Image (tube, helix red, strand yellow):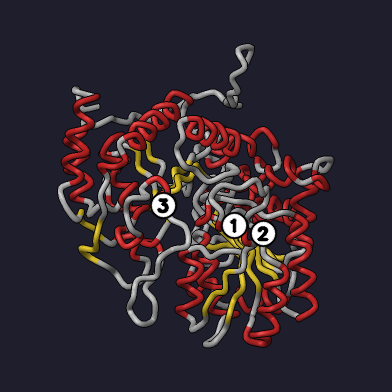
Amino acid sequence: MRNGEELPLEMHKVKIVQRIDLKPVEHRLQAIDEAGNNTFLLRNRDVFLDMLTDSGVNAMSNLQQSAMLTADDCYAGSESFYRLEAELKKVFNKKYFLPAHQGRACEHLISRVLVKPGSIVPMNYHFTTTKAHIRLQGGDILEIPIDEAYKIESDCLFKGNIDIDKLHEAFEQYGDRIPFVRLEAGTNLIGGQPISLQNIKDVKAVCKSHGVPLVLDTSLMQDNLYFMKTREESCKDMTILEICNEAAAHVDLIYFSARKFGCAKGGGMCMSDEKLFEALREIVPLFEGFLTYGGMSDKEMEAIAVGVRDVLDFDVISQGPQFIKYMVSELRKAGVPVVTPAGGLGCHLDAKQFLSHLGCEYFQSASLSSALYIVSGVRGMERGTMAEERNPDGSEHYSPVELLRLALPRRVFTMSQIKYAVDRITWLYENRHLVGGLKWKEEPRILRFFFGKLEPVDDWQRKLADRFLQDFPNGY
């Protein structure tokens, strides 16, 4: 801008809107209590800005909406499937495509086929459902990202990369127990940090030398493609399609959640290995549906086909990272601790530093998530200890990072809404001493962050609300 301010531009215009309501603080206080201080359990009608996730809540384009009207509704042999398959072949250049209802369904099928008791799967970082499916088959994971991955503030441009030396060590230690290596293109749990194209090539070289397939989760690939194009020297003169083709060429199996990659509800797996395809094909109808729908509606497949094509448009894939960068920058100006450099998916607050007066046993990320909802109506997602599982001896496994993720679904929020969130986060940071801890009230054994419930250790939430009312007497 002429005044020196840097603002990302919305490369779209709004044609359909959905009403949202900002409830007063007293209502929010009651709602978070009823939800057991778990933002997953909040009713959406009580949420003002839903920054829980970008999964399945990205705004569809007019072309996606209109494509859904052309769906070929049938159980087997749908033309909608073949149109989606054709788009995926252009992007990933793989011979085979198998559909599934979403990304975690792919993880389930892949784990059933490749993982056995005692398996160890090295990866740059786990996703909650990934680890759960591998463990359900008797295996376990080995996280070996580069050391920069755990540094909240950093100037490393690809904090999601696997440490190649540690990967070599993993093969030396576990050998035949490694069924595959997994890369996540945009590490969800450590700030949406990307991987580089070069790292994919380096990991593939190690895998090839040991005869082990490389599996790539491309759910967050559209953000990762943006970072490859803008941060990696070798990619600067390549088109987005060329970058995607090159990355896919060094990977044996690709799977994705179209709730992110494609901006519609579905998923799938792409590969060229015939034996792997046949092994996975056998169980798709058993768990997902027939081979030409895999748990998706034909309408969703039409929308995904358009969404996959949109991933190749630089203006489309730049929207998320640019708005996230703006939010991160504004919070840093206010002194709020955030993950840097700005990654994909959303803005990530460092709960450990934000609530440094609380010990890790008080669930810092969950406490921050609860507090932010009370003072703003913004729903974020705890990405810390609550998302972990207990150690085999029953002790709590404390996460190496405690983050509050504030997702920015594509083409959903306006600049004024982002500024509102920044303002309330800044107010909360200035009053952070009032935020207390949480403890378990109801603790599930698996995926406890989805439906576990916590309760405050004292009356800190009431005190926080009272302080809020001093500055905002109307309760908003």
Q: Secondary structure at mark 3?
A: helix
Residue 55 location in percent, x, y? Answer: 47, 49
What label does residue 161 carry, if any? 2
Q: Nearer the viewer, residue 329 or 66?
A: 329
Observer able to see residue 112:
yes
Q: Is residue 449 found left or right of 454 in the rendered image?
A: right
Q: Measure the C-alpha gap from mark 2 to mark 3.
A: 23 Å
Picture layout, residue 253 above or below residue 474: below
> Residue at the spot x=17%, y=34% of the render?
466
Q: Secondary structure at mark 2?
A: loop
Mark 1 or 2, closer to the camera: 1
User: On the image, numbered disc 1 is attached to which residue?
Assistant: 149
Picture layout, residue 26 above or below residue 111: above
Residue 432 location in percent, x, y? Answer: 32, 40
- Three-letter residue code for mark 3: Lys
Q: Nearer the viewer, residue 438 or 58?
A: 438
Query: Residue 276 is drawn in which quadrant?
Result: bottom right
* Quarter of the image where the N terminus is located: top right
Q: Residues within 10 Å of mark 1 (few under 14, many from 20)?
A: many
User: On the image, numbered disc 3 is attached to which residue?
Assistant: 352
